[in-house]
Image (cartoon, coloured by chain):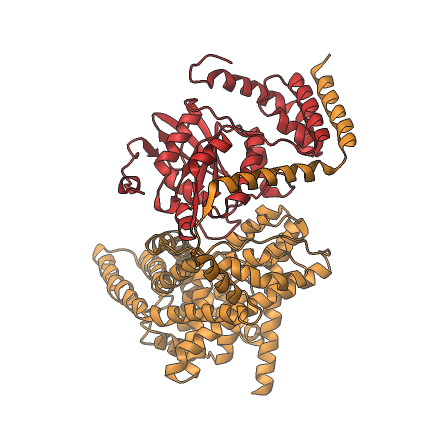
Chain colours: A orange, B red
């Protein structure tokens, strides 16, 4: 008898036996496994009386996942983390800027002059690439070095599953999978990672919803933009002693708004193109584990801070060159940048933004991290400010948020511009890495396009509405 | 714990971490376990890699691979997604289940959480149905101690029929002993006699035995005929296809080869 026939016979007899024993195979098997496991566990585990740790943990869990205190505690914790970041990052930022921009940059310039480098190369490499990189490092490194270790500590402690637990019922009511709360939390670190994490969701429908809405979680690259703009525009609008607190609250507000958008869009999708019931799952609340502080500091610095910074630097160097080029290559009597900005300004103003921001977002598509440096450079260029820059397309030295405020206000920025930029930074297309990851995970160009253009459409709509209402009431 | 056990130099003479470049290897080791039991921590401790670890279930969704060398042999280590069982339909369980069967690991390390042993044993018993060449890593004993729980690892080892190594992977405690056990099981110096579940009702037991017999006849030397029978009785499409296309034949041949080199004496059974 051929081997294939023997194999078919095995399958046939399996089918017959399946009918004979009925469907209780699974249940009766699981039952005997459970019995066996519990019998063995009883033999080998002994419990010492009078240890109250489990009770303490349960009490803590009851509070952090309670209906009344759960959400306020979550928001308060988030606000505390941002407040420490905002207050703590200013001084080291200034020190880094004075080192990389005030000291190293002139040194490089005189070295280039000494070596007799052609002006074009000199501008492209030192005024473009080097300054862009120096800017990214001094603006981003300090907040990240403070924010990521704190976030990682919360993660190691076991707080994230509690967040997911709190959010689960809300997501279910939006027609999405409760585990989306976890992938959303991952997105707060990096959207590309969040998109990959959606693999824990079994149902393809719910997984797609989680993929499309992950971009509404503010990622690493966008936190520094939010924190900086909140400090400059929101913080400066209130008395100095409240500035840190109010800016932190504004950033929390944007993060919460992102969660609300992810819920609303999930709800919309699950009632239109991705219709269906939410599936059930069980979520284990892991025990709280005392974080190992040094190890956490090390891994969060290496895995997150340096990783994100490296990515930013890699993208900033070519972007710096592009900025220098668009600022120095001329068509007629104006540079490419000036022409674009003048042309796009009316459109930008319609959305509470301006031409500079639109150009910056085009240059910064590869990485959200370099949006703010690009904006500042382009602003100086178009306002023709003197005393802060060393010529067209040079990223200049700014030692503190006060200087940044001065530049932006000279560029015609108002509180409305700041608010709309924060909103637009939350609601725009994912970065190129995330778009690529979405395509890899969904293998579907149509859904990738939806995930890319839906947020930017929402962003323009919301900014337009906010600008319109703002101007009506002003 | 004595201070010797904590000393990082202990057993390190035998351990060479190979990171993600194991190259060719002598033995394949799978790392299985419930979610959030510290599999990735064990993985990092052994391979020297820095896979991100986090205190939440479902962090590892794909397979991570790394390598190490111990006692003169090279090992490739595969970190599987954490699962509560191997009998349901979700994607992560399928990854774990298929790797244990079709990947044919020489040793499977099952990481269990000492603070909730009973639930973790459910998975251990299910893994035994696929492969008996296993080592149980009884992780988080420090946490269990804080909760006033002690686990008698020697009795547990006798009950399960495989080595049980108490460990606190975050502190590196128990890792040298774990490596030694993995080495011993891989080389056949330790022969596992895993406990098998007595399958439910009499009708089921008979059906399983009957079908397993036919499967062994069709695929002589297949080491996990009972598991294949079980999956067929549950109507697992992946398994039906594997039988139909003859994919199991490869497993049977490899299984027969492994059986002939396993015993310490080197004499085929």
Q: In percent of the image, x 53 and y 43: which residue is there?
A: B118
Whole-percent x, y for residue A268 in the image: 69, 63
For the C terminus of chain A, the quadrant is bottom right
Q: Please identify the quarter of the rendering in which residue A8 is found.
A: top right
Q: Please identify the quarter of the rendering in which residue A112 is found.
A: bottom left
For the N terminus of chain A, the quadrant is top right
Relative to B129, A326 lies left or right: left
Relative to B191, A131 lies left or right: left
Q: Please identify the quarter of the rendering in which residue A212 is found.
A: bottom right
- Residue in the foreground of this view, choosing between B140 and B179: B140
Whole-percent x, y for residue A221 in the image: 45, 61
Residue extending furthest toward the left: A114
Whole-percent x, y for residue B241 in the image: 68, 29
- Whether residue A333 can be seen here: no
Whole-percent x, y for residue A451 in the image: 61, 57
- Whether residue B171 can be seen here: yes
Relative to A90, A62 lies left or right: right
Q: Is B28 located above or below residue B19 in the figure?
A: above
Q: In percent of the image, x 35 and y 77: which residue is there?
A: A402
């Amino acid at each position: 008898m051929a081997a294939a026939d023997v194999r078919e016979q095995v399958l046939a007899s399996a089918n017959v036996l399946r009918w004979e024993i009925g469907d209780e195979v699974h249940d009766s098997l699981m039952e005997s496994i459970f019995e066996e496991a519990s019998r063995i566990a009883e033999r080998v585990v002994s419990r010492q009386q009078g240890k109250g740790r489990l009770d303490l943990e349960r009490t803590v869990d009851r509070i952090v996942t309670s209906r009344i205190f759960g959400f306020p505690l979550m928001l308060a914790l988030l606000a505390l983390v941002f407040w420490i970041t905002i207050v703590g990052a200013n001084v080291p930022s200034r020190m880094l800027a004075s080192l990389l921009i005030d000291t190293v940059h002139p040194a490089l310039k005189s070295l280039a002059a000494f070596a007799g480098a052609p002006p074009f190369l000199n501008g492209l490499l030192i005024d473009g690439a080097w300054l862009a990189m120096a800017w990214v490092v001094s603006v981003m490194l300090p907040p990240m070095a403070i924010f990521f270790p704190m976030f990682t500590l919360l993660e190691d402690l076991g707080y994230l599953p509690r967040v997911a637990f709190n959010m689960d019922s809300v997501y279910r009511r939006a027609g999405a999978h409760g585990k989306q709360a976890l992938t959303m939390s991952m997105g707060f670190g990096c959207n590309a990672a969040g998109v990959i994490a959606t693999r824990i969701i079994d149902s393809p429908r719910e997984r797609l919803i989680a993929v499309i809405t992950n971009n509404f979680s503010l990622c690493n690259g966008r936190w520094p933009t939010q924190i900086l703009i909140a400090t400059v525009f929101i913080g400066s609008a209130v008395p100095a002693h409240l500035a840190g607190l109010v800016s932190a609250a504004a950033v929390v507000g944007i993060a919460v708004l992102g969660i609300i958008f992810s819920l609303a869009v999930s709800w919309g999708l699950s009632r239109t193109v991705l219709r269906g019931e939410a599936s059930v799952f069980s979520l284990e609340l892991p025990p709280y584990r005392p974080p190992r502080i040094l190890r956490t500091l090390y891994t969060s610095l290496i895995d997150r801070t340096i990783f994100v910074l490296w990515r930013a630097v890699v993208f900033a160097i070519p972007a710096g060159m592009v900025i220098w080029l668009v600022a120095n290559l001329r068509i007629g009597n104006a540079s490419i940048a000036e022409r674009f900005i003048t042309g796009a300004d009316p459109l930008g103003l319609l959305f509470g933004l301006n031409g500079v921001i639109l150009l910056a977002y085009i240059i910064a598509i590869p990485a959200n991290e370099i949006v703010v440096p690009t904006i500042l450079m382009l602003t100086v260029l178009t306002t023709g400010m003197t005393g802060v820059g060393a010529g067209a397309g040079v990223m200049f030295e700014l030692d503190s948020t006060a200087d940044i405020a001065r530049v932006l206000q000279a560029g015609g920025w108002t509180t409305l511009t700041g608010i709309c930029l924060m909103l637009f930074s939350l609601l725009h297309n994912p970065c190129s890495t995330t778009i690529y990851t979405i395509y890899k995970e969904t293998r579907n160009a149509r859904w990738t396009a939806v995930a890319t253009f839906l947020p930017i459409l929402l962003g323009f709509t919301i900014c337009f509405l906010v600008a319109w209402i703002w101007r009506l009431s002003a | 714990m004595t201070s010797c056990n904590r000393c990082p130099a202990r057993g390190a003479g035998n351990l060479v971490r190979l990171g993600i470049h194991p190259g060719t290897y002598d033995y394949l080791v799978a790392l299985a376990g419930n979610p959030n039991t510290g599999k990735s921590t064990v993985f990092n401790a052994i391979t020297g890699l820095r896979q991100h670890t986090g205190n939440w279930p479902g962090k590892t969704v794909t397979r991570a691979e790394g390598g190490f060398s111990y006692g003169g042999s090279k090992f490739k280590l595969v970190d599987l997604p954490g699962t509560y069982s191997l009998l349901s339909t979700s994607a992560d369980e399928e990854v774990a289940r298929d790797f244990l069967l079709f990947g044919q690991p020489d040793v499977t390390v099952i990481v269990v959480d000492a603070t909730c042993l009973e639930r973790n044993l459910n998975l251990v018993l299910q893994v035994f149905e696929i492969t008996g060449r296993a080592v149980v890593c009884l992780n988080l004993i420090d946490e269990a101690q804080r909760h006033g729980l002690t686990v008698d690892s020697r009795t547990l080892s006798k009950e399960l029929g495989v080595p049980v190594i108490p460990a606190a992977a975050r502190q590196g405690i128990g890792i040298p002993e774990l490596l030694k056990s993995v080495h011993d099981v891989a080389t056949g110096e330790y022969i596992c006699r895993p406990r098998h579940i007595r399958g439910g009702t009499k009708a089921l037991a008979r059906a399983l035995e009957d079908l397993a017999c036919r499967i062994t006849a069709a695929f002589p030397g297949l080491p996990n005929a009972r598991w294949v029978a079980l999956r067929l009785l549950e109507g697992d499409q992946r398994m039906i296809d594997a039988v139909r296309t003859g994919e199991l034949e490869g497993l049977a041949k490899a299984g027969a080869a492994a059986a002939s080199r396993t015993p310490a004496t080197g004499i085929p059974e």
